[in-house]
Amino acid sequence: MSREKGDRPPLCPGAREQSAIAVAAGLAVFLATTSASAGEVAEGRRLAAQHCARCHVVSEDNRYGGIGSTPSFRLLAKAFPDWRTRFETFYARRPHPAFLAIEGRGRLRADLPANAHPVVLPASAIDDLVALAEHIRAQPDPRPASDVR
């Protein structure tokens, strides 16, 4: 069998399928590792521990912290169908506007309540906290769901 110049040799049986599987697997790995790339889980964890843990249970580290009526990050991330929207817009949801502002998206109230500690976060904090929520969603539950608050 003679080949013209530039002709490709015939592929081995199954080579196309194997190539397609390899490309699909590579794409899946890329998407999985970049799903939280807009934000950093470690920075989200740091921000949550510093600012959010006053009211929310943000990890097993402050399991008995927070305010009893405030949902934990685990509950918000795993039980609410609109979890992503909640994390992306937390700064506009009650009670956050009373004491929190995001740089470039508003400012603190002039009449801040006396018991409120003012918090101003960079805009990147939103992506970092969403990345943390994605990380929480991907983790197996360390204790029964009935024990979540």
Image (spheres, grey):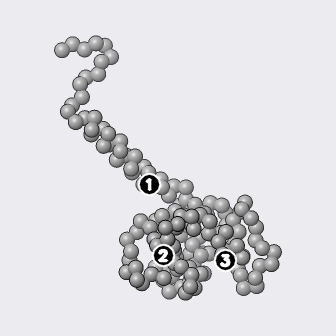
Residue 135 lies, with reference to residue 34, above or below; the image says below
Q: Amino acid at mark 2?
A: Leu
Question: Where residue 126 sits: x, y (%)?
Answer: 60, 63
Q: Residue furthest right?
A: 110
- The reply to whether residue 119 is in sight is no
Mark 1–mark 2 distance (CA, rounded to whole Å): 23 Å
Eyeballing the image, is 129 above or below 69? above
- Eyeballing the image, is 94 above or below 40? below
Badge 3 density bin: few <14, some 14–19, many ≥20, Cα 10 Å? few
| Residue at x-position 71% and y-position 81% | 116
Residue most extreme to the front: 81
Q: Are marks 1 and 2 in contact (CB under 8 Å)?
A: no
Q: Position of residue 83 (x, y in %)?
A: 52, 67
Examine the rendered structure and indicate whether residue 42 appears above or below residue 61.
above
User: Could one spot residue 71 in this view of the protein?
Assistant: yes
The residue at the point 28 percent across, 12 percent down is 4
Can you give x and y, in whole percent of width and height, for residue 125 in the image? Answer: 61, 64
Residue beneath disc 1: 33
Label drawn at residue 75: 2
